[in-house]
Each structure stands twice: as structure tokens, then as C-alpha cells.
């Protein structure tokens, strides 16, 4: 199970094998998540900073993965053991919490879940909120040798040449190259298809039923690759694909911020399914 409802989580607190992680984060203001945590959080939740805890120095892009050893050290500081159930939540429909979920799954930690509907669902259900920071008994988490199901830009290019499906999880306006608020070039990887992660959710911020997600991600072929702007919200698509029964999908961790940083890599604009104009390698964003 990859999703947990607010009532289900409330029924399991406190439990000695349950670790709740608050992964609220804002790209516009990196301090916002920690401030929101201080103002109120789910009881016993530990704060996890996406920018400093869930990103590091492996590969390119804005949020490269930390080393598996550094991630294991973080888990130890959070009190996580290989037997712990880790539940992550945010206030962005799971788009940030899914990064922690994916990282745990990538190193082989199977008991990882995302709170469906996140902070909003917890508050709407009337469950308890606290402001005190929990006392955490640190552990030693055994480090994994490597990340699994992760690829780099060269592997993406090879995969596309072999007909592997590459999915862009960003909003359609960024995919088409009509808007690029962060990166130096606008557009998408030529041949990619667009599956905006926000469309995995219903109006209340909870995930669509598995049958709808299965239809959304049908006919992808074997071992599809997912990317976004910096390797974070792509994990929201990976979560939805997992719910739909797709277990072999891979993450391009550097994502668009890594791809477009190399002026020799081609980009495409327009289209809805990767059928837009292919821009020259040196074309810059509008």
C-alpha cells in the first residue's frame, strides 16, 4: 500500500514502528515549510527539508539525489529502522512527500506511504495538531549500495532511441514551452509525453481511484522514465503509477533542469504528446 487516509493514520498514532515525516516545502520560499511545521503539525511528525535533506550532490539538476549513505544517515537521525513504517505528508497533494516515498522505495524500504490529501485532509478531518518537536531516538540505518530505478540524461537519450516511453510530469504550459519560470530554456525532451502530476488528484486533493490512474498511465510499455523540473514532482507521477500497478518505472533524477543546462541537448516545444516542433540544440528559452 502506498497511500494512507487521514483516519487510518490517526488510528495508528502513537505506534512505536510508525514514523511520520512532514515534507512541506515551497519553491518560492524555502523557509516556508519549516515555518508551517513550527505553527502546527501532525503529532510526533519529524520535519524533513526537501532542499537540504532529500537532495544532495549526485548528478545534475536543481535537486540531485544525496548519496545513499547520506540518506541512510538522515533516516537514522529521524529514528527510522528497516522495520519502520514511514508516512510522509505535505500540503501539495503529495508532490513533495512522494519524493521521500520514492527514495525509500529506491533503497528497498517497502513500508513507505504517503498521506492521501496531505495536511489539508488531516486538518479537515479534525485530527489533533501539535507544535512541540518530538524527541527522537536516533538509530543506525544500514546504507544501500546504490539508488535503483534511476537514470541520467545519457540513459534517457538511449531509451528514447529504443522506443521507451519518457513522461514529463510538469504542467502542460511548461511542457509546451509557453512558460518557464525557473530554467534557462523552455520546452521538453523531444519525444516525451506529458502527464501532469496535478491531474492525478481529485478536486479535494486526494488521489483519483486506481482504475482512473490505470487508464491515465495505460500503454506505456516496459520500464518508462519519468522526469519533471528537478526530479521532485516526477515522484508524484511515480506514486500514481505505482498505485496503477506499474512497478518498473524509472526516475530521471536530474530532470529538465539537468537536460536543458547542456546546450548540445535538443529541446522540443508545442504539442501535447511530444509531437511539437523540435528546437535547435542552441535555442534559448523565449
Image (spheres, rainbow, N blue to C red):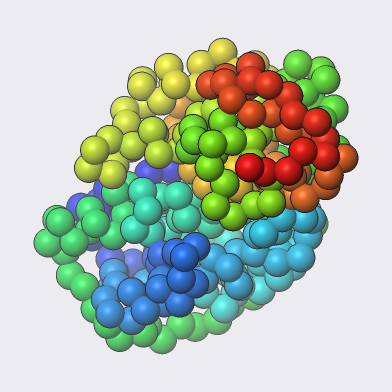
Camera sees residue 245: no
Camera sees residue 260: yes
Give the residue at x 53% y 42%: 179
* Residue furthest front as drawn: 286
| Position of residue 228 in the picture relative to residue 24 (left or right) | right
Give the residue at x 46% y 82%: 136
Q: Is residue 262 above or below residue 195?
A: below
* Residue furthest left as drawn: 126
Q: Position of residue 129 (x, y in %)?
A: 21, 73
Q: Position of residue 135 (x, y in %)?
A: 41, 86
Q: Nearer the viewer, residue 18 or 228?
A: 228
Quarter where residue 201 is shown: top left
| Position of residue 108 in the picture relative to residue 126 (left or right) | right
Q: Position of residue 154 (x, y in %)?
A: 85, 38
Quadrant occupied by the C terminus = top right
| Position of residue 210 in the picture relative to residue 79 (left or right) | left
Q: Nearer the viewer, residue 48 or 4?
A: 48
Give the residue at x 15% y 56%: 124
Give the residue at x 14% y 56%: 125
Q: Nearer the viewer, residue 69 or 205?
A: 205
Q: Nearer the viewer, residue 211 or 230?
A: 230
Quarter where residue 169 is shown: top right
Instruction: Count every numbered label the image shows and give the total.
Output: 0
Q: Is residue 263 above or below residue 120?
A: above
Q: Position of residue 13 (x, y in %)?
A: 28, 66
Q: Is residue 147 above or below residue 226?
A: below
Quadrant occupied by the N terminus = top left
Amino acid at each position: 500500500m502506498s497511500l494512507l487516509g487521514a483516519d487510518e493514520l490517526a488510528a495508528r498514532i502513537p505506534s512505536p514502528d510508525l514514523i511520520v515525516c512532514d515534507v512541506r516545502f515551497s519553491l518560492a520560499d524555502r523557509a516556508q515549510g519549516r515555518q508551517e511545521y513550527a505553527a502546527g503539525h501532525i503529532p510526533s511528525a519529524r520535519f524533513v527539508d526537501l532542499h537540504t535533506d532529500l537532495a544532495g550532490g549526485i548528478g545534475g539538476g536543481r535537486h540531485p539525489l544525496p548519496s545513499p549513505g547520506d540518506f541512510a544517515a538522515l533516516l537514522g537521525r529521524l529514528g527510522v529502522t528497516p522495520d519502520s513504517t514511514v508516512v510522509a505528508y505535505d500540503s501539495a497533494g503529495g508532490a513533495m512527500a512522494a519524493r521521500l516515498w520514492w527514495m525509500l522505495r529506491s533503497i528497498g524500504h517497502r513500508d513507505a506511504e504517503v498521506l492521501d490529501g496531505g495536511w489539508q485532509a488531516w486538518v479537515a478531518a479534525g485530527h489533533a495538531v501539535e507544535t512541540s518537536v518530538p524527541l527522537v531516538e536516533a538509530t543506525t540505518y544500514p546504507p544501500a549500495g546504490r539508488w535503483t530505478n534511476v537514470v541520467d540524461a545519457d540513459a534517457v537519450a538511449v531509451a528514447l532511441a529504443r522506443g521507451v516511453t519518457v513522461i514529463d510530469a510538469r504542467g502542460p504550459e511548461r511542457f509546451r514551452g509557453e512558460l518557464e519560470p525557473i530554467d534557462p530554456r523552455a520546452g521538453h525532451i523531444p519525444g516525451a509525453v506529458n502527464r501532469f502530476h496535478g491531474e492525478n488528484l481529485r478536486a479535494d486533493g486526494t488521489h483519483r481511484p486506481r482504475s482512473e490512474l490505470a487508464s491515465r498511465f495505460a500503454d506505456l510499455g516496459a520500464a518508462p522514465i519519468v522526469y519533471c523540473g528537478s526530479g521532485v514532482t516526477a515522484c508524484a507521477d511515480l506514486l500514481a503509477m505505482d498505485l496503477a500497478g506499474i512497478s518498473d518505472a524509472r526516475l530521471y533524477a536530474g530532470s529538465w533542469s539537468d537536460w536543458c543546462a547542456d546546450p548540445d541537448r535538443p529541446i522540443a516545444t508545442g504539442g501535447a504528446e511530444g509531437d511539437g516542433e523540435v528546437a535547435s540544440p542552441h535555442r534559448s528559452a523565449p
